[in-house]
Image (tube, grey):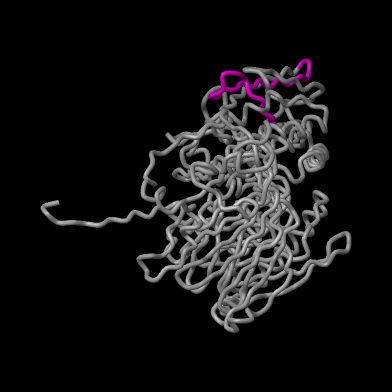
Amino acid sequence: TNQRRYSTIVIKFNLTPNQLNNMPSTSESQSRVALNSAVKADAETAPVECFRADYEPLPNIVSKISMDFDIRDGKTVVTSEMTIEPNPNGKGPGDLVLDGDETAVKLMTLQVDGRDLIENEDYELSPGKLVVKGVALKDGKGLLRTVVETVPEENTQLSGLYKSGPMYCSQCEAMGFRRITYYPDRPDNMAVFDNVRIEADKEAYPVLLSNGNFIEKGSIEDEPSRHFAVWSDPFPKPSYLFCVVAGKLGSLKDTYTTTSGTEVQLEIFSEEENVNKLDYAMESLKRSMKWDEDKFGLEYDLGIYNIVAVNDFNMGAMENKGLNVFNTAYVLADPSTASDSDYERVEGVIGHEYFHNWTGNRVTCRDWFQLTLKEGLTVFRDQEFSGDMGSNAVKRIEDVCSLRARQFAEDAGPMSHPIRPDSYISMDNFYTATVYSKGAEIIRMYNTILSEEGFRKGMDLYFKRHDGSGVTCDDFRAAMSEANGVDLEQFGLWYSTSGTPTVTYSSDFDAVTGVFKLTLSQKSNSEKPMFIPVSTGLIDKVTGEEVAPTKVLELKEDTQTFEFAGLKNDVVPSILRQFSAPVKLVSSTGEIDEETLKFLAAR
């Protein structure tokens, strides 16, 4: 052009992205390009509302996974090998859908059975998703290998793998594992984390921990300043229960021997200066293990149980399988400064996370709409444990006061929601007093209706049916119903009804026949009457003696009248004993009878 001559040679290379990434670089500008780099540029997407009714099982699942963490300052490389299989609960082999946060992880390698996958032909990337097409798998099976890079030092969300002071730690509930690598990051994919290898600087991070049992450790032959540790968890678990820790930590060690004679190694880690404050946490852990064996016949199932206390931990505590992580506020107790409430809090939270080993880990949620299945049940269990360790009456009063102050207020406000929501935009918004505390009250009502013996029968059937599975609230209710031969269909309304029901009472005594009649009415946000257990006893007005012991009145209609015969004198009804249902109890007159309350309080 313009009398100038140009000679142009065009050379076309038909390379896959992985082949391109593996080409040697001569400068920073020629560094490898992440496979998901284009997605990262378009990562701004509108919030998506998820609905419980839209649940579908995955066509393919990860049944086993091995991981390698190469931790270095400023960059951690995570290599994963996943065994892919058709989902036995699915509709047949199809695409493999993986979750991943492209703002946190760079996807550098993607292979199936040793073959580099080709974008659009074998896989597709979109914000938050990696879909490996069914054509890249053999009848829905294959060995998927990924290599990702992440920077824990820049992870200020404290979700996924992050650095807390001098320590690396992970938090994966509810959806943090996708910030570590691409994976089916949902609770119904339960996989065996067969081999987790962690490598880091030996001096800076002498302690390397993960889930399950310790396998081996050693130095890196060509890098003597670095070392590694390998862990393996034989029990299938969802990704939200995965954990990895690397740091310079002191510890307190002990052992516990289960009822069947298995010795379990116990260790609680924290900074060296905190080790002298860990004794009560260790005592609480051993009491929790013994109580679960005695109360529910549930033994611990691994040879190691570790706890790590972290200063920067935004979940309070987390029940990762065999490796619990706590905020230090729930573990440390200095005998010179800790109050009774401090000790109670440590004992309760240590127990709560331990009890999750069965109610949450061995049997977990099918999807996050079922969160109350594991949390409500485990809160009930930790409440019972704390009561048995101290005073059941005092503990129950404290729990009801907290429920009425926090959860009743939540139920009465604009954020009112049922314990099992029908939709969410961000799952993190549903870690609420309703899901936890009211959820525990719904579990307690099973115990009230069926008796402690009947509740234990239901729990036994629940574990027998669903060990190693992700299930629903309806599965739990079905186990309770079938183990006791009781119809609990109406009781299911508690899971879908928001707000606090009101129970109104009135009474009448016929001195001639000696019959006392108690009329109960209910009002709630449910279109149908709910199943409300109202534990009631009668106190003789003249003698002050209990003339009718506690009986569970099953309020199943809008209004019901219950009769008590054979009474000599008029009585004062003691209604809603043990706060047998999370309801508001009011007189039909709308007035508070101070004299009756004094009478009951005195007795």
Q: Which one is nearer the viewer's eye here, 70 or 174?
A: 70
Q: Is residue 602 visible?
A: no
User: Residue at 79% across / 59% down in the picture?
Assistant: 290
| Residue drawn at x 41%, y 48% as measured from the top left | 39
Whether residue 338 can be seen here: yes
Left or right side of 337 for 5: left
Relative to residue 198, is residue 504 depicted above or below?
above
> x%, y% of residue 78?
56, 62
In the displayed orientation, state which residue is furthest to the right. 260
Q: Which residue is more in the foreground, 507 or 473?
A: 473
Estimate the x, y position of residue 343 in percent, counting from the top left. Answer: 62, 64
Q: Residue 513 colored magenta?
A: yes
* Quadrant of the image containing the C terminus: top right
Residue 552 appears left or right of 346: right
Residue at image coords 71%, 53%: 192
Where residue 261 sits, quadrant-wise, is bottom right
Residue 8 appears at what percent x and percent y?
28, 55
Instruction: Work out whether residue 290 or residue 420 is closer to the camera in this orientation and state it.
Output: 420
Magenta range is 512-534
Q: Residue at x 50, y 56 (%)?
A: 18
Image coordinates for residue 447, horizontal then vertical, percent: 74, 38
Residue 381 lies within the magenta run: no
